[in-house]
DNA sequence: CGACGGTTCGAAAACGTTATCGATACCGAT
DNA sequence: ATCGGTATCGATAACGTTTTCGAACCGTCG
């Protein structure tokens, strides 16, 4: 296990005929080295293919120019965020690393904290955490939270307007004439799930229609959990004519369940989702849903993180707008 | 930019009343420390929440216990691999970091080499590269290639049996009575695309049906490129009755084009894909395709990498089987 | 009783980088 | 000539860890 080929700063220094200190200055663009020297050293660096040793760099300066993004799992939601984030990072001088807990469903809740402890201050200069449960963060290490769990988070956050989106969705269903509207809500510890349910209730109240409590149920944000809930809802004697699912995954799951129960969508049941993951355009029927600008959220969170590290003063809570995407899974009640 | 809170090995040593050398031995499970001391130090480590500084660790020992997986972009294909890989890594003692070039379409070809140069030997102990163009790798640093570009690669690889899969697909269409079969092939510099086209031609030849060269066209593996190609194919005066698309993305794209041209699938056109990405089950009609065990490929590549690093002797070329997944996008020719 | 093997521990030297700060060279002005 | 002031550069001390190697101790055996 040897790394014989790695060229280090002292090699560059020797063949350029200067000291390592000077090479370091050139690499980091510090003041105090003659233009001619700069160019010579640059040339040697290029010729030798020198790359700074991240470990040593971090050890000495506590900076690595590497940013991390932590997701629970690589599913469509996170993936879209990742796309936006990795696009944003290009040209920023940072590298982006994605990290997944990798441990499935029943994983310990504190995985992000452990990962962060391990990575922070040594491997990465900052991180964006998706759907985090943690709030505390050690001083001097920057993290921004995307779509955090409930609770007063002191962290900088970026999310979308979940409440307004839920109102949008509910109003759309209402405008189609639906009154018996079911809601499959997400994990109650998720701030976004809570807000979506709140928006749903608000819109119903504003329209003056009472919500039948038997029609709003926790389904989880995962596809399996939602299936059971959808089945319960649809098996009800007077089942809802429309379902507002807490996210696209559970909406898609509802579509499946309806099909297997012989309930045609949208004819006998309207379904609306939330998120607008790419899949929602592909399912049959194409899903009407609320669009969260996922890629943009990823991009914004990275930009925010970079700004935070650079110390620029700015608003640390970004809320992006949601919008209704009408496809084919809803229709007016006869 | 200070990190005041970070507890270092010397802190542990001091409060445990031993030297840093001893702590290091405990952490790394080295021989030569009394059982009682081990337990005392372990306790202190836990109490103080000590985490090794990856930078210093790597600097000194050239090991980080971090593995990387490099993908060009976070699309369904890579994502499935990532899932498999991150599942496999759990409990292996390694951490897994995903890295994406982030730069879109026209990015420089050598991005992986640059990334690898930067990360290798300092940040990660080894890497799996998805769809790599590079072949060379510095000595002592292990990489395994998934679905590599064409050319004799000296790298350890894992892929699926693209040739056999293409034969499977073609034979299926043939068995349905199709003779005018079109093929949208992937980027010609991809080994897998080349093999799929070869399998297609082989199966046609074996069945004694000549391939009409106007019906096999390069479409690229990206959804946009494939759309144009599909449109050309379907606009032909005597258009094919079936299309074997080089991958699911182009198959899905073909479905779209067919719909917009008013050609019903599968009634007037059969379409078969390759990969079996999750999306293919969701589209309308659900796509008949060839399944590559993507998650398993991810898992196998990680296992291979770990074994390689550990120095175990084993076959360094893994080829996983493909299989036909019949859904609803093909039907017998009348 | 001295030597010896085994066990447990710590001092100290790396690893490759960055930051400080003193040394040197050079310049124009007195 | 001497001097103050700038540029330019290099020695050197960290950073937190791993590893080597010898010291110290204890019990055993000849």
Image (cartoon, coloured by chain):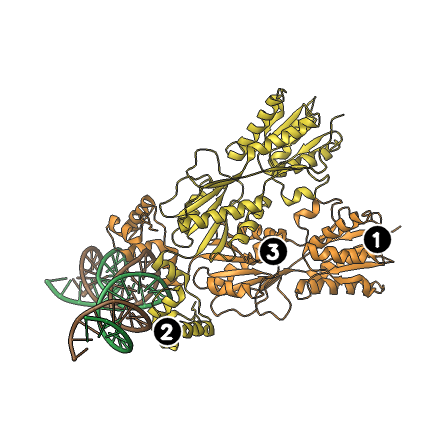
Chain colours: A orange, B yellow, C brown, D green
Give percent across and percent down for residue A297. 60, 56
B325 lies left or right of A306: right
Pointer 2 residue: B13
Instruction: Choose the circle earlier in sequence order: 1 or 3.
Output: 1
Give percent across and percent down for residue B75. 58, 45
Give percent across and percent down for residue A93. 45, 53
Residue A1's disc number: none
Residue found 53% across the figure and 47% down from its top: B298
Assign a secondary structure to mark 1. loop
**Chain ID, mark 1:** A
Residue found 70% across the figure and 21% down from its top: B238
Height in image: C16 above or below B331?
below
Residue B169 is drawn in which quadrant? top right
**B161 or A76, nearer to the observer:** B161
Asked if marks 2 and 3 fall on the same chain, the answer is no
Assign a secondary structure to mark 3. helix
Q: CA distance from mark 1 to mark 3?
A: 30 Å
Assign a secondary structure to mark 2. helix
Pointer 3 residue: A297
């Amino acid at each position: 296990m040897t790394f014989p080929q790695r060229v280090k700063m002292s090699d560059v220094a020797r063949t350029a005929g200067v000291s390592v200190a000077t090479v370091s200055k050139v690499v980091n663009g510090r003041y105090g080295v003659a233009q001619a020297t700069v160019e010579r050293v640059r040339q040697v660096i290029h010729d030798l293919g020198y790359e700074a040793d991240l470990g040593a760099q971090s050890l000495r300066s506590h900076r690595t120019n590497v940013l991390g993004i932590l997701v629970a799992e690589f599913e469509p939601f996170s993936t879209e965020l990742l796309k936006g984030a990795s696009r944003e990072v290009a040209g920023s001088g940072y590298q982006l690393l994605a990290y997944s807990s990798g441990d499935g469903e029943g994983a310990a809740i504190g995985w992000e904290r452990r990962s962060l402890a391990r990575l922070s201050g040594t491997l990465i200069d900052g991180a964006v955490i998706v759907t985090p449960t943690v709030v505390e963060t050690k001083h001097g290490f920057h993290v921004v939270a995307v779509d955090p769990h409930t609770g007063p988070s002191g962290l900088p956050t970026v999310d979308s307007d979940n409440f307004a989106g839920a109102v949008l969705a509910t109003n759309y269903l209402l405008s189609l004439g639906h009154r018996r509207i079911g809601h499959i809500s997400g994990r109650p510890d998720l701030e976004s799930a809570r807000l979506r349910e709140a928006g749903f209730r608000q819109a119903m109240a504003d329209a003056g229609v009472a919500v039948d409590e038997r029609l709003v149920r926790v389904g989880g944000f995962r596809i399996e959990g939602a299936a059971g809930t959808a089945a319960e809802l649809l098996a009800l004697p007077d089942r809802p004519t429309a379902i507002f699912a807490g996210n696209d995954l559970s909406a898609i799951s509802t579509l499946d369940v309806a099909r297997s129960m012989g309930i045609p969508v949208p004819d006998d049941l309207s379904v609306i989702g939330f998120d607008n993951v790419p899949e929602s355009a592909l399912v049959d029927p194409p899903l009407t849903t609320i669009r969260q600008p996922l890629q943009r959220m990823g991009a914004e969170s990275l930009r925010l993180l970079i700004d935070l590290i650079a110390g620029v003063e700015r608003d640390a809570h970004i809320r992006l707008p949601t919008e209704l995407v009408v496809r084919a899974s809803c229709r007016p009640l006869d």
